[in-house]
Structures are given as C-alpha cells and as structure tokens.
C-alpha cells in the first residue's frame, strides 16, 4: 500500500477542527474546495491523507480530484513541512546575483536540498523561480517575509532563528 | 439552424455551429491523425497531433482540430507542409518516450520522422490523459494526471493502490500505446501502471464452471443509480458462457426433458 508520499507518520487528525473548516467556515460547498485545502494545509503545515479523505467525503468530490489539485499547485504539499520555511529565489535575476551559492550554503550547513525538511522538522527549504521582485535581487523569503538584497549573513541569521524555535 | 460554409482541403462543405473541425473532417471522409481524442470523451487537446491550418480572411493560424469549435465561415487545410513538419516533430518527441508502440511507428513512417532524433526516455506513456478521462467518466475515478510540467504522470491518489477501481478495463482499452496492463490472477484483477500495482479487484467466481470472470460489483451502489423498479440482475454469479448454456438448456428443455 505504501506510496512515496505516504511514508511519513500521520499526525492525529482532529475532526472537530476539520469540521470547523469544512462545515462551519465553508458550508461544505465544493466551490470552496481550494480554500478548504489551504486552511487544512495551514493547520497541519501540509495536507495529511486522512484529512483529504475526510474532505473528499464531506464535499463529495472524488479523492483523485483532490489529489490532482494537491499535486498541481506548488503551494500545496503532501509531505509535512518544517516549522519554518525558507524560499530562495532561483529565478534568472536572483540566480545571476548568486542565489545558487546560497542554496549550496544551506545544503552544506543544515543538510537539506530544495524541497527537503530537516529531521527535527524545524526548517524546510523550498526554492522558487522568481518571486516577482527582481529589482531587489537576490531575494529570500523566510516564513512569508521578504528579505531583499540578501546575502550569506542574512541566511546565517535566519538559520539560527529557525534552529532556536 | 444556421449553418456555416467551410472550405476544408479545397472541398466546400457545410458545418453546424460549434461542431469541431475534427468532427467535420470525419464527416467528410478527411483523415486527421489524433492520439488523445475519443469521440466518447470531452476533448483535452493534449497531444497536438491533430493540428490544422485555419484561414480567416488573410490571417492564418494553427489550431487543434479535436477541440476547435467552428463559429465562422473559414477555410481549413489539414495536410500542408507546415503541418506535416509539426506532426513530424511531435512524433519524434513521442518516439523518445514510447519507441515500441506500433501506432507511433506507423505514424513515424507516414510522416518520415527520424525516430532516433531524441534520446530514449525509457517511458511508456504519451501523456494523452485518455485513461484518466475515461476512468472519470465510466470507471471508478481512480486515475489522474498528477503533478504538472515535466513531472506530470498517470497516477492513482497518493501513488497508492486504489480502492476505487472497479476493474472495468476502460483505461486499458483506450490507451493508444498499451501502457496500462490488467491481469487476472488467482481470482483477482490487477491493474498495473508503469509496472506498479495500481489496483486490485476481486473477481466473481462462476457458480457453474468454477472459473473466475468479471469483477465483483457493488450491486446496491449500481442499483441506487436507477429509478425505483429497476430489476436486479439474475445470474449475477454465473459467467456469460455458462449463462448462455443455462438459457439454451432451458429453451431446449421445453422440448426435451433433459439434454
Ligand atoms: S479499470 Fe479501474 S482504473 Fe481503469 S478505467 Fe476502470 S475503474 Fe478506472
Ligand atoms: S528572479 Fe528572483 S525575484 Fe525575480
Ligand atoms: S487529438 Fe487533438 S490534440 Fe490530441
């Protein structure tokens, strides 16, 4: 049964929380499916399979469709993410300003590549291709906050911050 | 109803509004190659093989015949050097994925494609999406194209063996390159995608000859889709061959006591 995405242990699913999202907030209306998925992702920092199965049942959308959506949008993750998320922009402008080196630096320092999470679940690195702020390249996004014209010292501070939490 | 005047490959024909170019061509005996189209399903325009030239006034554009609805009087050319060139490239690219497919080999010959132009990707799927679309329509909603861009591939939910498959075999039937495999082994029907087990469905055991035949069906679910008064099937546990024998015996039995 085990697929690649399902190797992780699932967290306890609190169905009251799911109901408050699916029923109370979005009225079990399948038109709000993506918003519900975003809310679930926010709750668990990823989309647990059990929660998606429950969602599929509640809004009567086939599980396969929910899976399709979850794999289509880059902002959804089927793997648990770390408490902190760092996005290094590897778009053209930022790449030219040396973000490739920054990625390597993080990899050598905490041992994760893009898309990976540290074993202590404190940090995930998810690199993106252009965050739309090329004028202030190189750009780093840490927990949804933008750090323009970043350099290695900024990264080091952020890594320390991630570790201390 | 208003009809459209279309010129297709030099022939003046009439079309119904919103008819697709492919439908019109087929109606008029003009062949356009397709890989991702089935008249039974909504067109998805995934393969681009059905590309034709559309002339409107002095403008010319390339459109996919399978999903382009006709709305104005236009001229269409289905087999120009430019189109042949485009199709040739598509086939060359697809040959890098499924070099073993007789269908693609035939097309490659027809369009003079250089089958070794791109290095072998060792894949077995042309990503037409037909299996996912047919499964959504007639099957158990088991398959989809997951991911996107270069990562897109035919998949079951969470890449796990799926509990939704009803073993109908539609995906196997519709796949143009025979990439989906279904085997009946020891009373079970096993669906395989990219060599991986994608689903397993129990088969019914024939009460008369003891052989396994079609998949076990959730009759209550099926019956619930009908109006009241639908009659559940008799002989549900007898294979088609035995059912025929049983019926023949019954007819014959009217004349002879035993047979
Ligand atoms: S055999 Fe299973 S996977 Fe294939 S179309 Fe039928 S239900 Fe879908
Ligand atoms: S390339 Fe980094 S913001 Fe555009
Ligand atoms: S048949 Fe039209 S794009 Fe594939």
Image: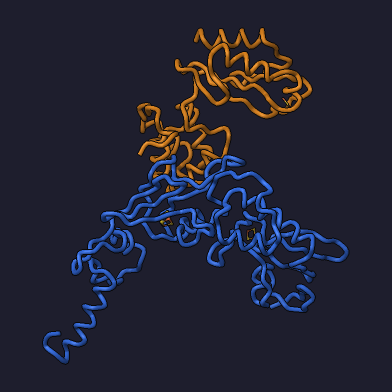
Chain colours: A orange, B blue
Instruction: Work out whether residue B19 or residue A39 is closer to the camera in this orientation and state it.
Output: B19
Height in image: B210 above or below B90?
Answer: below
* Residue A70 visible in rendering: yes
Instruction: Work out whether residue B214 or residue A58 is closer to the camera in this orientation and state it.
Output: B214
Residue A3 sits in quarter: top left
Quadrant of the rendering where the N terminus of chain B is positioned: bottom right
Q: Is residue A154 left or right of residue B75?
A: left
Q: Which residue reaches farthest left? A: B257
Instruction: Work out whether residue B49 or residue B163 is closer to the camera in this orientation and state it.
Output: B49
Residue B207 sits in quarter: bottom left
* Residue A40 visible in rendering: no
Q: Is residue B211 left or right of residue B178?
A: left
Quadrant of the rendering where the C terminus of chain B is positioned: bottom left
Height in image: B180 above or below A148?
Answer: below
Residue B148 sits in quarter: top right
Q: Where is residue B18 in the image (x, y as percent from the top left)?
A: 67, 68
Q: Position of residue A58 (x, y in %)?
A: 40, 44
Height in image: B217 above or below A106?
Answer: below
Which quadrant of the frame does ligand 1 lie within? bottom left
Q: Is residue B154 left or right of residue A133?
A: left
Q: Where is residue B163 in the image (x, y as percent from the top left)?
A: 35, 48
Q: In this view, does A107 lie to the left or right of A43?
A: right
At x 48% / y 39%, what residue is drawn? A26
Q: Where is residue A134 in the image (x, y as percent from the top left)?
A: 76, 25
At x 66% / y 53%, what residue is drawn? B115
Q: Which residue reaches farthest right? A: B58
- How many numbered tags mark residues here? 0
């Amino acid at each position: 049964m085990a697929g690649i995405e399902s190797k992780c242990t699932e967290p306890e699913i609190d169905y009251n929380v799911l109901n408050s999202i699916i029923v109370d907030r979005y009225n079990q209306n399948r038109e709000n499916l993506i918003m519900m998925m975003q809310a679930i992702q926010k709750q668990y920092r990823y989309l647990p399979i059990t929660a998606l199965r429950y969602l599929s049942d509640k809004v009567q959308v086939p599980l396969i469709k929910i899976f399709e959506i979850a794999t289509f949008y880059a902002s959804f993750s089927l793997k648990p993410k770390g408490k902190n998320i760092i996005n290094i922009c590897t778009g053209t402008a930022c790449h030219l300003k040396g973000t490739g080196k920054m990625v390597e630096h993080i990899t050598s320092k905490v041992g994760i590549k893009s898309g990976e999470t540290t074993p202590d679940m404190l940090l995930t690195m998810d690199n993106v291709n252009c965050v739309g702020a090329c004028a202030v390249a190189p750009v780093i996004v840490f927990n949804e906050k933008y750090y323009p014209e970043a350099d290695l010292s900024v990264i080091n501070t952020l890594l320390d911050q991630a570790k201390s939490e | 109803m208003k009809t459209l005047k279309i010129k297709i490959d030099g022939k003046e024909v009439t079309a119904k509004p919103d008819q697709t170019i492919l439908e019109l061509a087929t109606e008029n005996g003009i062949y356009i190659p397709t890989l991702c189209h089935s008249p039974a399903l909504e067109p998805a325009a995934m393969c681009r093989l059905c590309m034709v030239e559309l002339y409107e006034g002095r403008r010319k554009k390339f459109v996919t015949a399978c999903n382009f609805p006709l709305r104005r009087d236009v001229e269409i050319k289905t087999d120009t050097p430019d189109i042949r060139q485009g199709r040739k490239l598509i086939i060359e690219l697809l040959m890098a994925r499924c070099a073993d497919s007789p269908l693609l080999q035939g097309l490659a010959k027809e369009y003079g494609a250089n089958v070794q132009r791109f290095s072998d990707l060792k894949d077995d799927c042309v990503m037409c999406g037909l299996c996912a679309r047919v499964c959504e329509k007639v099957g158990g909603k088991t398959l989809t194209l997951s991911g996107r861009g270069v990562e897109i591939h035919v998949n079951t939910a969470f890449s796990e063996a799926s509990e939704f498959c009803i073993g109908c075999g539609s995906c196997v039937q519709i796949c143009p390159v025979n990439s989906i495999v279904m085997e009946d082994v020891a009373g079970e029907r096993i669906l395989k995608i990219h060599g991986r087990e994608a689903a397993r469905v129990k088969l019914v055991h024939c009460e008369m000859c003891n052989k396994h035949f079609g998949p076990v069906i959730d009759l209550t679910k099926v019956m619930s889709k009908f109006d009241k008064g639908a009659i559940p099937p008799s002989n549900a546990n007898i294979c088609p061959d035995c059912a025929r024998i049983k019926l023949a015996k019954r007819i014959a039995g009217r004349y002879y006591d035993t047979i």
